Amino acid sequence: MIPTDLATGIALRDAGMARAGSAVPAAIANDWRSKAKVALTALANTGTVFSADDLVKRVGEPPVPNMLGPLFAHHARLDIISAVGFRQAQRPSAHARIQRTWEGK
């Protein structure tokens, strides 16, 4: 059984992820999201480890930064990718933060 606080946190996380990108016009968000889904699936099929940096190299920065996490989480839930580690982000907009690395299944 999931503790109540954790369950609430999970519900709040999922609700926030569902709203990611809602502050920009739908056409812009949907265009980027469509391109990113295709590119993420292609990255998963390469057989190499990749990160958000690699996705951004292919499709550009998202209209709002919080669109990246939900995209990766969605593909992980679909069992297309799995998290395999962490590395420091290389693109300047990521401010050298630690990001997950992924590989296709």
Image: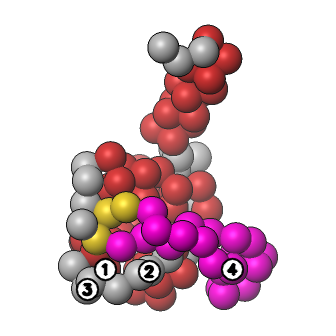
**Residue 50: mark in rendering:** 2
User: What secondary structure is found at the residue carrying circle 2?
Assistant: loop
Residue 40, horizontal then vertical, whole percent: 32, 72
Residue 88, horizontal then vertical, whole percent: 69, 80
Q: Are marks 3 and 1 in contact (CB under 8 Å)?
A: yes
| Location of residue 93 with respect to 28 vertically, above or below | below
User: What secondary structure is found at the residue carrying circle 4?
Assistant: strand
Q: Are marks 1 and 2 in contact (CB under 8 Å)?
A: yes
User: In the rendered structure, which segment of residues is drawn in magenta?
Assistant: 83-103
Front-lying residue, 66 or 96? 96
Residue position marked by numbered label 4 in the rendering: 88
- Mark 4, Cα crowd under 10 Å, few <14 / some 14-19 / many 20+, is some
Mark earlier in primary sequence (1, 2): 1
The answer for how far apart the CA atoms under marks 4 and 1 are is 19 Å
Residue position marked by numbered label 1 in the rendering: 43
Residue 38, horizontal then vertical, whole percent: 25, 71
Mark earlier in primary sequence (4, 3): 3
- Mark 1, Cα crowd under 10 Å, few <14 / some 14-19 / many 20+, is many
Q: In the rendered image, which quarter is residue 96 located in?
A: bottom right
User: What secondary structure is found at the residue carrying circle 3?
Assistant: loop
Point 65% across, 85% down: residue: 91
The answer for how far apart the CA atoms under marks 3 and 1 are is 5 Å
- Amino acid, disc 4: Gln
The answer for how far apart the CA atoms under marks 2 and 3 are is 9 Å
Q: Are marks 4 and 1 in contact (CB under 8 Å)?
A: no
- Amino acid, disc 1: Leu
The answer for how far apart the CA atoms under marks 4 and 3 are is 21 Å
Is 91 contained in the magenta span?
Answer: yes
Q: Are marks 2 and 3 in contact (CB under 8 Å)?
A: yes
Is 27 contained in the magenta span?
Answer: no
Residue position marked by numbered label 3 in the rendering: 46
User: What secondary structure is found at the residue carrying circle 1?
Assistant: helix
